[in-house]
Image (cartoon, rainbow, N blue to C red):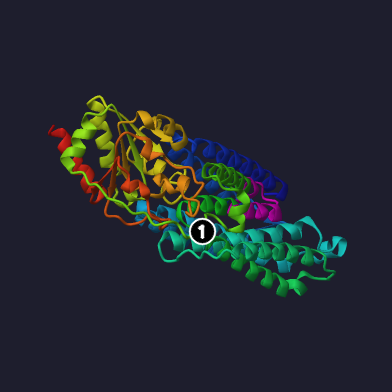
């Protein structure tokens, strides 16, 4: 089979795969089609990999080391399958962060492997200042930052790494960014005969990128983490796109651009929702000071019977889900509660904060798993307008996203973050295990509000008992 013929087949396959990526991404925009979209995009990727193994040629020679390649693919498939099957819904953000970090690491390794093999003829013709070298250096820098930052994010989401809040980190991070850009300019302006002469500088650049990736995520905590995960995801996409430039691989380029652009758009939208600037994300200085004021007051409790009566005779109920709902795996019984209330004439909606949980869309995924209709999931800025007319607002495992300190306390780390204005509802029931602080590790004045009643206990068991109480009314 001639190289021209195989090249044509490969190009057509790459176009088909690219189209499946676009359609798959479009289908991910709605829960009803998300699963099918994932399958469509995965099929396109499998097709691209198969076509590459069968038809890719360089200098008239097919790909070598097929045995090693297939073995690595088989090993990765088995490991990925086992991890994905065993992961709990509460650990999904950690899994997303880990997988994203692996993508960044792969992009960085591509750059590390390709740099010493830059064609000497290209260097002799145009020096190091060319698009090929720029793609390698950008892939190394962005991929390394994504990998290092994602690993720190994984550790923080898993509770193994604590926040490092030092005001001066803003300037350190900006300095490190300037150093990284300086390395790119320095390497591209050197006059050398082979790229291997500059390998020591490439290793130093790699080290600086690792340090920056770690430091820019370390101070970020609380409700800001989903925004950072989204940003790191876009970094990985851009780094993968650099690999597409290196290999003149259209499907790799398309996939990277889609991931990078989608991640960037999501990051910008979430920054707006959080009232943050994208610069602050990159500089790694999210949040305010750690010196939030201490809240004092009297906590008022409610028993199951009274809670059941209050909900049963309401006209409008709003449920605010949070990470505690995921921890308790209570999404199914929560949906059973809302169906039971609707059967009794109660209008039930869910208030979805953009950063509720630990990753973008965490609550949407959780409730979709329980078959909660998508039209019942209302974004916080929209549902806030209706809260004064809401008879009961039920907070299930949420904390920071309903914390009035975001509006009232300039010293709070979450000050300026838009919230679900829970205190505007006529009655508030907060379901929690105890009086522990949320992910941002700050007090919540809502728990001491005159309208608030605390219903302590495991969310799943409490909701089950609540359902039984309402059935008996």
Q: Is residue 231 left or right of residue 377?
A: right
Q: Quadrant of residue 306?
A: top left
User: As displayed, is residue 204 above or below residue 99?
Assistant: below
Instruction: Indicate the position of residue 351 as horizontal and vertical percent values.
Output: 39, 37
* Identity of the residue furthest to the left in this view: 472
Q: Nearer the viewer, residue 165 or 188?
A: 165
**Residue occupying the point 56% across, 42% down:** 272
Tag 1's secondary structure?
A: loop
* Residue 66 showing in the rendered view: no
Instruction: Indicate the position of residue 133 as horizontal and vertical percent values.
Output: 75, 60
Q: Nearer the viewer, residue 18 or 164?
A: 164
Q: Main secondary structure of the magenta part?
A: helix
Asked whether residue 458 is drawn in magenta, I would say no
Instruction: Indicate the position of residue 220 as horizontal and vertical percent values.
Output: 51, 58
Asked whether residue 251 is drawn in magenta, I would say yes
Q: Which residues are magenta?
A: 235-254
Instruction: Indicate the position of residue 268 as horizontal and vertical percent values.
Output: 58, 44
Q: Is residue 170 left or right of residue 303?
A: right
**Residue occupying the point 23% across, 50% down:** 456
* Identity of the residue furthest to the right in this view: 125
Q: Nearer the viewer, residue 298 or 340?
A: 298
User: Mark 1, residues whose alpha carbon is within 10 Å: few (<14), some, or many (≥20)?
Assistant: some
Q: Nearer the viewer, residue 10 or 311?
A: 311
Q: Quadrant of residue 118?
A: bottom right
The C terminus is located in which quarter?
Answer: top left
* Identity of the residue furthest to the top in this view: 345
Q: Is residue 193 left or right of residue 107?
A: right
* Residue 424 showing in the rendered view: yes
- Write down the residue under mark 1: 289
């Amino acid at each position: 089979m001639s190289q021209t013929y195989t090249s044509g087949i490969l190009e057509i396959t790459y176009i088909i795969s690219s189209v499946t990526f676009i359609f798959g991404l479009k289908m991910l925009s709605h829960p009803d089609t998300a699963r099918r979209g994932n399958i469509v995009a995965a099929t396109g990727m499998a097709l691209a990999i198969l076509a590459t193994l069968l038809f890719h040629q360089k200098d008239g020679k097919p790909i070598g080391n097929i045995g090693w390649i297939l073995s690595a693919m088989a090993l990765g498939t088995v490991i990925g399958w086992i991890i994905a099957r065993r992961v709990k819904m509460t650990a999904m953000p950690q899994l997303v962060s880990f997988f994203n970090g692996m993508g960044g690491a792969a992009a960085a390794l591509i750059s590390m492997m390709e740099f010493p093999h830059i064609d000497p003829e290209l260097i002799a013709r145009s020096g190091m200042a060319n698009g090929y070298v720029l793609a390698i250096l950008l892939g190394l820098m962005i991929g390394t930052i994504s990998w290092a930052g994602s690993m720190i994010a994984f550790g923080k989401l898993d509770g193994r790494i604590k926040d490092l809040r030092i005001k001066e980190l803003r300037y350190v991070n900006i300095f490190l960014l300037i150093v990284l850009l300086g390395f790119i300019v320095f390497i591209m302006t050197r006059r050398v005969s082979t790229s291997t002469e500059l390998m020591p500088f490439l290793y130093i650049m790699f080290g600086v990128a690792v340090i920056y990736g770690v430091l820019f995520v370390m101070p970020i905590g609380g409700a800001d983490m989903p925004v950072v995960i989204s940003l790191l995801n876009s970094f990985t996409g851009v780094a993968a796109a650099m690999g597409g430039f290196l290999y003149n691989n259209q499907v790799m380029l398309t996939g990277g651009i889609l991931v990078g652009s989608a991640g960037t758009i999501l990051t910008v939208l979430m920054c707006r929702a959080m009232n943050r600037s994208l610069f602050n994300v990159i500089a790694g200085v999210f949040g305010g000071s750690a010196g939030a004021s201490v809240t004092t007051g009297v906590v008022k409790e409610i028993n199951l019977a009274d809670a059941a009566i209050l909900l049963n005779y309401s006209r409008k109920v709003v449920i605010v889900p949070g990470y505690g709902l995921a921890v308790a795996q209570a999404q199914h019984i929560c949906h059973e509660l809302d169906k039971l209330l609707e059967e009794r004439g109660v209008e039930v909606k869910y208030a979805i904060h953009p950063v509720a949980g630990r990753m973008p869309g965490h609550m949407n995924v959780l409730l979709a798993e329980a078959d909660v209709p998508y039209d019942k999931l209302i974004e916080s800025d929209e549902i806030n307008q209706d809260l004064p007319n809401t008879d009961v607002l039920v907070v299930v495992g949420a904390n920071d996203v309903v914390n009035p300190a975001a509006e009232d306390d300039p010293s709070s780390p979450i000050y300026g973050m838009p919230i679900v204005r829970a205190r505007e509802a006529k009655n508030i029931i907060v379901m929690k295990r105890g009086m522990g602080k949320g992910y941002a590790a700050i007090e919540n004045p809502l728990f001491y509000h005159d309208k608030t009643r605390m219903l302590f206990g495991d969310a799943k068991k409490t909701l089950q008992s609540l359902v039984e109480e309402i059935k008996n009314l």
